[in-house]
Image (spheres, helix red, strand yellow):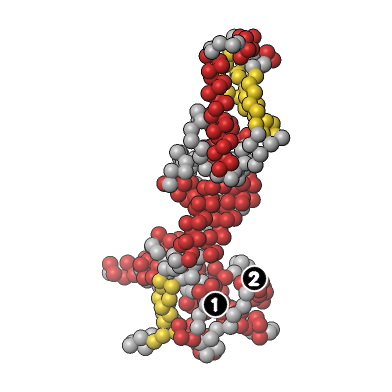
Amino acid sequence: MNTTSSITFYCRNSKTNASGLACIEVCVRLAGERITSTLPRRCAPAEFRKMIQSRTQNPIKQYTTAVASKIEELITKCLIEGRSFTKEILRTNIQYGFVEYHSTVGDLFRNFLESQQKKVEAKLSTQRNYRKYEIVRDLFFKHSGIKCDSVALSLRQKHIIDFNTRLMELYDSTTVAGMMQKLKSVFLHALKNKMIQENPFMGFKICRKEKEVEFLTQEEVDKIRQAKMPSDNLERVKDLFLFQCYSALSYCDMSALRPSDFQKNEYGYIYINGERLKTKVKFVAILFEDAITIAQKYDYNLPTISNQRYNTNLKIIANICGITKPLHTHIGRHTAACYLLNKGLSLEIVARIMGHSTTKITRHYAKLLDKTVFNAVRMIEQGGQ
């Protein structure tokens, strides 16, 4: 970077207020670029010119000399740290009284992502989760009105609100809430490491609208089980989906299964004891007869298929079976969770089967069927007789 620079100060007649005062402006010419900013001090333009041209020391000359010295220090510091000196850096430092040079917003994300990458390497997180933070970073610089090289001190809640508003136009509320939570984690990390002085999320509430969990009734599951598929490929997809409905496994955990993952305990139960690929939370899925039948059909080596093709074929199966609910990889897991809860298993047990870290997540699936409600009422009545 060429450090040859010139610093000039102005006080324009055209910018005077009702009292005849105008803000002092500074112009920095550096490497062929002209960077200007307004200083917080005001002066009458005629008096300013007189003091600047004076041979003796006066308050204005002392002020402009001090500001020029600070700007030179700032330019030098940017050079040492390999950064470009920008209008944003100049304005922010002027605003904060030329405090020691602070990180850029890009630095906040870089520092946070480095910590996340270490977690991935230590197998405390996943590359997929790391990628989600990268997506949030890219969207933030695209839609928040702030740039990667903006000084972190310039972050305001306005940028958070603008970003949230734009995301709400592009995604559903649940997706937006997840992205905003990730963004908040970045700034909390920066605050903890003293890269920023205030959290721009302070006072901002992330609104998460709970989505209605969709699941299949027993009658709808039976429709799929009894339906004849027109091809072997669709038959395999049907089996995989039913296995999810019977085991509560997610698509990625089911795809990762190997024959050695199927175990039998001393009571004769066949079960899968594993760790969620997504969250690293342990789970234990006890397989009932229907799930075991499907597993045995493939010698405990379930077929694999891409997520996209799996979902595409599920739509075909839904049409064949006359099911209007949207069939997708998640609805099989939802169906199993709701079925287990409606059979009377406690939230704690179902949370263990699902691989949930807390029952708060499991409670999301606690959708009681009308039949369950009626049976519970009937049992109360019979008990009272």
Circle 1 residue: 255
Name the element at disc 1.
helix
Of all residues shown, which one is farthest toward the front?
A: 55
Left/right of residue 339 with respect to residue 47 in the rendered view: left
Could you tell me if residue 112 is visible in this image? yes
Name the element at disc 2.
helix
Number of on-image labels: 2
Counting from the top left corner in percent of width and height, residue 194 is at: 43, 43
Answer with mark 2 or mark 1, whichever residue precedes in sequence.
1
Q: Quadrant of the N terminus?
A: top right
Left/right of residue 139 with respect to residue 98 in the rendered view: right
> Is residue 360 or residue 63 the one in the foreground?
63
Res 298 → quadrant: bottom right
Q: Quadrant of the C terminus?
A: bottom left
Disc assigned to residue 38: none
Left/right of residue 58 with respect to residue 189 in the rendered view: right
Res 92 → quadrant: top right
Circle 2 residue: 308
